[in-house]
Image (spheres, helix red, strand yellow):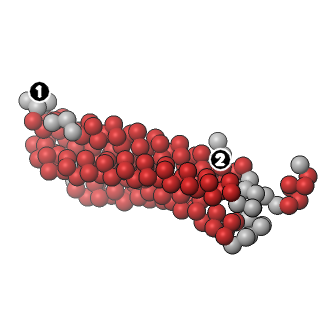
Amino acid sequence: MTLSNYTKRAILGGVLALGVIGLGTFMLGHLSGYEAKILIKSSITGLNTLCNTIVLASATILALMLTLLGVSSSTSSTLKKDHYTHIMQLAKLDTIIFVISLLFFLLFNLPVTESDNIPDNWFNIIYYVTLGISAVLSSALVEVVLMLYNTIVNIIKIVGLGITDHPLAESKESKESE
């Protein structure tokens, strides 16, 4: 699978978001198991809200992509296959984020801090894993939004502004040669 410059920029944005979140986690320092257990108790509602928000955002983006496809197919300008490949990549990534966020939403609802069977030193690991999960999901959503933004800008340039020399617009010469 080849990545367009638009997708590479979106990935870079996601990696930057992940770096910022990782830096914030690093600045917290090392925690003991007991401190981690307290932090898990206080942050679990926020993690649930984050996963819920990502699930809703992903579902909304998927629904709006149907409108995007309608606009793309009903235009008088002909779009190259790369445009539709980009939309498929976006839909695939968004669906993966939707499923993973939903699974972790369910997982974060387990009463881990109330369990007597989990040793205190495990809470440190659980805390950092939950932080990592939320960081990856958040940065992945940033990537999806940046990819969607690039797609919308391209459609506006091709369909709305009528730019015919755009890399995703099929020129009349290439149509006639087929």
* Residue bearing the label numbered 2: 85
The type of residue carrying mark 2 is Thr
| Helix, strand or loop at mark 2 | helix
Inspect the image, locate mark 1, and give the three-letter code of the amino acid beneath it.
Answer: Asn
Q: Is residue 113 left or right of residue 52?
A: left
Residue 22 point in image, percent of width and height: 34, 54
Disc ID at residue 117: 1
Q: Compared with residue 22, is residue 41 higher up or lower down, i.e. above or below?
A: above
Q: Residue at x 73, y 65 (%)?
A: 166
Relative image position of residue 50 (x, y in whole percent)? 30, 51
The earlier-in-sequence mark between 1 and 2 is 2
Between 62 and 128, which is closer to the camera in this rendering? Answer: 62
Q: Quadrant of residue 23?
A: bottom left
Q: Residue furthest top?
A: 117
Residue extending farthest to the right is 177
Q: Is residue 68 left or right of residue 165?
A: left
Q: Position of residue 27 (x, y in %)?
A: 26, 58
- Mark 1 residue crowding within 10 angstroms, few (<14) / some (14–19) / many (20+): few
The residue at the point 53 percent across, 46 percent down is 91
Label drawn at residue 86: none
The residue at the far bottom in this view is: 161
Q: Nearer the viewer, mark 1 or mark 2?
A: 2
